[in-house]
Amino acid sequence: MLDKASSLTGYQLSGLDGNIGSVKEFYFDDHHWTIRYLVADTGTWLEERQVLLSPYALTEVHRKTNHSVALTQKQIIDSPL
């Protein structure tokens, strides 16, 4: 099923051990017509930092609730700035 990427904006992201944040925007590769990264706003749990997540990190998409990410909060903390 195809959906607009913009329909994912604002969705909550749940990691393996807790909340990651919410989808803020996307980096799109217009040469290959793919989403390269999701920009996740981590809110206040990580000093109001935004992180880039590979779309391959998404494991499940629940339309009404949230999305699961195959990453831990520690992996998000240790990601490059």
Image: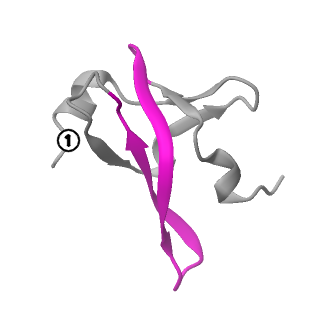
The rendered magenta stretch, by its main secondary structure, is classed as: strand
Residue at 29 percent of width and 23 percent of height? 73
Residue at 55 percent of width and 30 percent of height? 12
* Residue 42 in the image, given as x and y percentages of width and height: 35, 33
- Identify the residue under disc 1: 79
Amino acid bearing label 1: Ser
**Within 10 Å of the Cα at label 1, are there few (<14), some (14-19), or many (20+) other Cα atoms?**
few
Q: Nearer the viewer, residue 48 or 59?
A: 48
Q: How is the image coloured?
A: one colour
The answer to whether 32 is drawn above or below residue 38 in the figure is below
Spot the residue most to the top: 17
Residue range (magenta)? 15-43
Numbered circles on residues, count: 1
Horizontal side of residue 21 vs 80, given as left or right: right
* Residue 71 in the image, given as x and y percentages of width and height: 37, 30
Horizontal side of residue 52 vs 26, given as left or right: left
Which quarter of the figure has residue 43? top left
Q: Nearer the viewer, residue 45 or 57?
A: 45
* Residue 23 in the image, given as x and y percentages of width and height: 50, 43
Verify whether residue 38 appears in magenta. Answer: yes
* Residue 1 in the image, given as x and y percentages of width and height: 84, 52
Residue at 52 percent of width and 86 percent of height? 31
Circle 1: element type:
loop
Verify whether residue 21 appears in magenta. Answer: yes
Spot the residue most to the bottom: 31
Q: Nearer the viewer, residue 59 or 44?
A: 44
Spot the residue most to the right: 1
